[in-house]
């Protein structure tokens, strides 16, 4: 389902509005990290991933894992837009008995793994990529991680094994918005030089502007960059991207807009 840049940019705008609406209505959610990762998710789902909403279990599909599972609203919005789930179901987000919980689970068609307990997604991706090699299937596995999540030791165990097994069908993406729930990543647990660390673990590393869809396509369409090596994309992003008064503000990791803030947000997004 190849789409042009203008289409993808419009789609990202539309998904941003759905994210704000979902969080405002549910009075719950992770607005900052959802908005920082939208352009990455849109590029993946509308341009890169080989998936079929009618066959979510198709064995040759590409796999996507949202390791930063708390940023779930944009993920659900896209799955609904593509027809994995009904758009009406988005209204049940975070409500009692809904399968659209605050962190994704495999009860939702299209979701490959239960995530949100941070630090697990890349290990699951390693398993799927290894299985793909063993089964001689040519699908790729994409794992989107948070930058705060890089402080989890299990991320680096997965990184080590991915290069050991030469998993060039595995693509890790770091949503590098430089903030986590408790403040700037460099104050909580400094990550730099992040790209050198991943290189030392045997990965091919590329840094991109995570809001530049053309740049994202350019990298994502050309993996593996080096045969036999997993690819790690550091996507530089802005937490809360698209809404001026919440951009780069750590408190909007998990804050719900008031009525007045909601109106201002929608005005900006329109
Ligand atoms: Mg972050």
Image: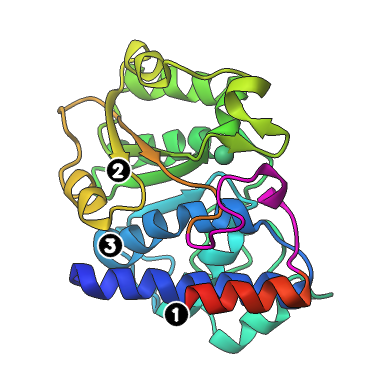
Indicate which label's residue lies in the foreground, 1 or 2.
1
Majority SS type along the magenta span: loop
Q: Residue 50 carries which label?
A: 3
Q: Which residue is drawn at 26% across and 49% down?
A: 216
Counting from the top left corner in percent of width and height, residue 128 is at 42, 42
Residue 98 in view of the camera:
no
Quadrant where ligand 1 appears: top right
Q: Separation of disc 1 and disc 2 at Cα?
A: 31 Å
Q: Separation of disc 2 and disc 3 at Cα?
A: 18 Å
Tell me which segment is drawn in magenta: 242-257
Position of residue 133 relative to residue 110, above or below, is above
Q: Quadrant of residue 5?
A: bottom left
Indicate how the structure is coloured in the image. rainbow
Query: Are the residues flagged by discs 3 and 1 in contact, CB closer than 8 Å?
Result: no
Q: Residue at x 55, y 85 (%)?
A: 87
Residue for badge 2: 135
Q: Residue 81 carries which label?
A: 1
Residue 56 in view of the camera:
yes
Q: From the viewer's perspective, is 191 left or right of 255?
A: left
Residue extending farthest to the bottom is: 88
Disc 3, SS: loop
């Amino acid at each position: 389902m190849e789409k042009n840049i203008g289409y993808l940019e419009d789609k990202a705008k539309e998904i941003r509005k759905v994210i704000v609406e979902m969080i405002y209505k549910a009075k719950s959610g992770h607005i900052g990290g959802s908005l920082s990762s939208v352009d990455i998710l849109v590029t993946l789902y509308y341009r890169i991933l080989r998936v079929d909403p009618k066959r979510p279990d198709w064995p040759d599909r590409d796999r996507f894992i949202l390791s930063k599972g708390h940023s779930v609203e944009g993920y659900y919005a896209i799955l609904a837009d593509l027809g994995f789930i009904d758009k009406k179901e988005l209204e049940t987000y975070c409500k009692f008995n809904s399968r659209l919980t605050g962190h994704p689970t495999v009860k939702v068609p299209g979701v490959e793994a239960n995530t949100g307990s941070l630090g697990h997604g890349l290990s699951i991706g390693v398993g799927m990529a290894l299985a793909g090699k063993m089964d001689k299937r040519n699908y790729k596995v994409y794992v989107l991680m948070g930058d705060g999540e890089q402080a989890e030791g299990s991320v680096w165990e997965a990184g080590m094994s991915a290069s050991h097994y030469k998993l060039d069908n595995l693509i890790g993406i770091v949503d590098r918005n430089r903030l986590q729930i408790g403040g700037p990543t460099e104050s909580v647990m400094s990550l730099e030089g992040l790209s050198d660390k991943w290189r030392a673990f045997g990965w091919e590393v590329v840094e991109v502007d995570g809001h530049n869809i053309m740049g994202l396509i350019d990298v994502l369409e050309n993996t593996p960059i080096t045969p036999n090596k997993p690819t790690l994309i550091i996507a530089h992003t802005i937490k809360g991207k698209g809404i001026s008064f919440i951009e780069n503000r750590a408190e909007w990791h998990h804050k719900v807009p008031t009525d007045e803030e909601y109106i201002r947000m929608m005005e900006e997004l329109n």
